[in-house]
Image (tube, rainbow, N blue to C red):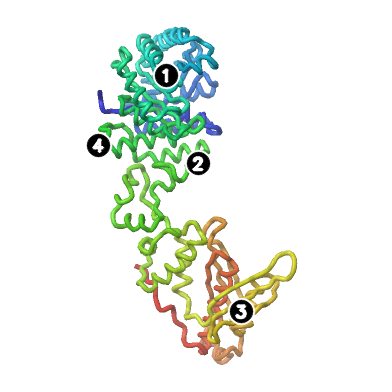
Amino acid sequence: MDNYVRIFDTTLRDGEQSPGATMTSAEKLEVARALARMGVDVIEAGFPAASPDDLEAVRRIAAEVGNPGDGARPPIICGLARCSRGDIEKAWEGVRPASRPRIHTFIATSDIHLQYKLKMTRQQVVEKVVEMVGYARSLCPEVEFSPEDAGRSDPQFLYTVLEEAIRAGATTLNIPDTVGYTTPEEFGELIAGIRRNTPGIENCTISVHCHDDLGLATANTLAGIHAGARQAEVTINGIGERAGNTSLEEVVMALHTRRPKFDLATGIDTTQIMRLSRLVSNYTGIVVQPNKAIVGANAFAHEAGIHQDGMLKHQQTYEIMLPATVGVSQSRLVLGKHSGRHALKTRLQEMGLSLDEAALDLVFERFKALADKKKTIADADLEALVSTELYQPCEVYILDGLQVACGTMGMPTATVRLRGPEGLQVQAAVGTGPVDAAYKAVDAIVQAQNTLLEFSIHAVTEGIDALGEVTVRIEARDGQGTLDAQKETDQPRTFGGYGADTDIIVASVKAYLAALNKLLVATGLYGSIETAAVQTVAS
């Protein structure tokens, strides 16, 4: 038995049967080209008898992708057909332009399908298989036969059907677990039993086609391969009927990553997996779940502090494959509430910010407080934190508490508690809105005469939990400390302030206080303007 596993991709046929996943002919052609570039052995281009558009799509793929014209070995182009002359003729019409065409015909073999769907006896099914497989073989040199619902079929009857299919000219025998019913042990034994008990099987390729109704599609496929199957029928992102099909990326990367275990190979260029995953997702409109193996957004992302620390020390501590192997540029250390100090320091360094230990302690404390409010911390959030914590002047007044009440009923009211030279001070005020009320309460405590010149607000990141960023600019009035008319040429008259928080009112008060603190220091009443004790320096 050889050690090469053919990859039969049915994204364009079974995958397209996912609700809402229908693709246009042009989109199918683009996906087929991408599959061929990736090294797929067989492309099941569609079900030609389903509609004229499907027939045309199969024909076009067969003509263009099945005949590359550049000397490269083209993939086999396959069309699906029920065991009926009309279907088989349509399938042949579709795949005929390909240099390597294949007709794939099927009929159910489980008793439940025979009784309720086909209303046929076992003998009638055998006769139909012999007739239709023979007819397909008279048209096409490659014929694949599938006993639908093989996973729930009587094994002895299955052996008989497969034997007759071989005699009629089938070159590939596909064993489908159509409803995802079997377990890996059962499915592996089914394949092993077929190999032991089907005369002529040594002259055919055994294929496996598993569905994911119980979440076992990939495990069943690998069990079938381990038992001797040498073709795996899969789809990109695992899309397909109901819960989907076996995922191409999972099977291929399992064989690739566990090569010593299986000692098997495929012809897939794994570095194209992620690109093709995104292409199919875009065309079908089916979003890949974040925790999807191999191609999910979180497949190479780490948030837990222990994992991040391990990854920073050695990649293989928490990753069994390199991201580049599947076309991902690099692993991501996702900063959130589970992240540690090591990961934060590394990310800040990657952003060009090198902090000493005291500065890192200050930013890390604020980072943890923000992470309790947001699921994920973006780079823009970190920049805002660093600006807020490390580039503000020495603080004369610090916000210690804020409570606001506003809405369509009543008057907007704000109560502010500040920590300053006189200790804790609390003041309430009414304004035209919550920000105006808060600023009036601050003015009542700080007593720094000024005029608000500019007030700007925007979200640092996207989403309802975004960090809000506020910048203000104030102008000192004459008579404030030493900032009188005689000193205007020596001292600045305008001061900017910046604040960031998930609560935009809090961010607004922080920004206002930052500007007021600069004004107070500039008056000479509270020392000189200086940045925080710890300075951030670009690395």
Please identify the quarter of the rendering in which residue 193 is found: top left
The residue singled out by tag 1 in the image is 146
Coordinates of residue 366 in the picture (x, y in percent):
46, 68
Distance from the alpha carbon under mark 1 to that under mark 3: 78 Å
SS type, badge 2: loop
- Dots 1 and 4: beta carbons under 8 Å? no
User: Residue 364 location, x and y as percent?
Assistant: 42, 67
Total numbered circles: 4
Cα distance between the residues tagged 4 and 3: 69 Å
| Mark 2 touches mark 4? (CB < 8 Å) | no
Q: Nearer the viewer, residue 173 or 191?
A: 191
The residue wearing badge 2 is 287
Which of label 2 and label 4 is nearer to you?
A: 4
Query: Mark 4 or mark 3, which is nearer to you?
Result: 4
Question: As shown in the figure, which amino acid type bears the numbered disc 3?
Answer: Val
Labelled disc at residue 442: 3
| SS of the residue under disc 3 | helix
The answer to which of marks 1 and 3 sits earlier in the sequence is 1
Query: Looking at the picture, which amino acid does disc 1 mark?
Result: Ser
Q: CA distance from mark 2 to mark 3?
A: 48 Å
**Residue 39 appears in the rendering:** yes
**How crowded is the residue under tag 4: few (<14 C-alpha within 10 Å), some, or many (20+)?**
few
Q: Tag 4 or tag 2, which sits nearer the N-term?
A: 4
Which residue bears the numbered disc 4? 260
